Amino acid sequence: MDALAGIREPNPPAEAGRPSLPEAHASIALPVGGHWFRRFLAFLGPGYMVSVGYMDPGNWATDLAGGAQFGYTLLSVILLSNVMAILLQALAARLGIATGRDLAQACRDNYSKPVGIMLWLVCEAAIIACDLAEVIGTAIALQLLFGIPLIAGALITALDAFLVLLLMNRGFRFLEAFVISLLIVIAGCFAVQIAAAAPPVAEVAKGFLPSKEIIANPAMLYIAIGIIGATVMPHNLYLHSSIVQTRAYERTPKGRREAIKWATTDSTIALMLALFVNAAILIVAAAAFHGTGHQDVAEISDAHRLLSPLLGLGIASTLFAVALLASGLNSTVTATLAGQIVMEGFIHLRMPAWARRLVTRGIAIVPVVVVTWLYGERGTGQLLVLSQVVLSMQLPFAVIPLVCFVSDRRKMGDLAISRSTATVAWVVAGVIVVLNLKLLFDTVFG
């Protein structure tokens, strides 16, 4: 007897109503039979699109500040947040594949209308905070590479809407190829910079071990929570639960189990790349700035100016700026998709991709232009770090519903997670909530 024969389908309203991201739903065919590697390649893509959010410009500010101020100590936070991200993204993929509903749709199906609207507004705030980081990062990259003023660069980022529209019209697989190509550029740039920095291996290894000082030192904790907020992105959970459904896997118990396996493998490998990039940013900052009289470097433009002379590599600063621009462009694609998925899932409101992008980006551009006008480059750097802390504050509102859903056999059937996995997931959710409460307390009373 087939070992999967006893598996039952998830209960209604699974896959009822309009599918998530309908223009790309089940649009990518999978090979029938053949070597397992061909199946893996067919599933490869969504994990890399999700990983973009884990190395967007917001990460740069927090990682640079962490490395410059505290050396390699916060590498343990990057590792912890990446492990948390791997687990949470695997749960998001499982939800989408097992139920045929993305996280936003699942929230709408299972919560009252007021709760659903509240969760939607919180998620929109997170997307705007993420978009804020992308606007700042892209504007800074344009200034560093081409000398374009920050305010003009911020306004130019509105044209990203048309880039997304062009890519979507070419097909979802083309979109994934574009994202993966830019990820390779980012990783290559930092590989060269790591080699030039030649950090002490023992110190780097020690940095991956947890330290009590991270909790005890309010300044270090602020950066640490910013790193978690920049790494574990709330809107990525909504995004991943949707785009895994672009594969035309069999909507049967056996097909779903195989899809969950490959989707989890895809996202885990992709997030290891994100771990490398985030760790590389902090390591380069620690090697170049910490202990060399530049511990106060927290601005991306300052890092760009100092990298080449401090590392003794003329191209280092240029590579840094190129990677930043690639990061900003990539983040544009995934944030637009996430915004569409969230809006359609929570309130069933459809907007053209370009219109959605212009609205979100317009909201993000305004504070960047105002802060740049009033406070200059340093103000935008502080706004960038603040946006990541805001993102971290939104995390519980996405993580807690996700863990509830994937633990519920009434919704997931036999594809619900085990008790042990649920326990770990709730511990992760608890850590996120506690860290955010600590940050809120320190902000109000500290």
Image (cartoon, grey):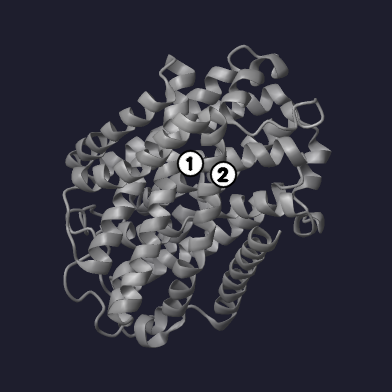
Q: Which x, y percent locates residue 254?
A: 34, 73
Q: What residue type is labelled 2?
A: Val
Q: Residue at x 60, y 29 (%)?
A: 191
Q: Residue at x 69, y 63 (%)?
A: 445
Q: Which residue is drawn at 66% across and 52% down?
A: 222
Q: Which mark is residue 329?
A: none
Distance between mark 1 and mark 2 Cα atoms: 12 Å
Q: Which x, y percent locates residue 25?
A: 21, 58
Q: Which x, y percent locates residue 126?
A: 42, 56
Find out whether the residues at labels 1 and 2 contact each other: C-beta distance under 8 Å.
no
Q: Which residue is drawn at 35% across and 58% down?
A: 124
Q: Residue 385 carries which label?
A: 2
Badge 2 density bin: few <14, some 14–19, many ≥20, Cα 10 Å: many
> Does the image show residue 32?
no
The local secondary structure at tag 1 comes to: loop
The local secondary structure at tag 2 comes to: helix
| Residue furthest top as drawn | 314
Q: Which mark is residue 56?
A: 1
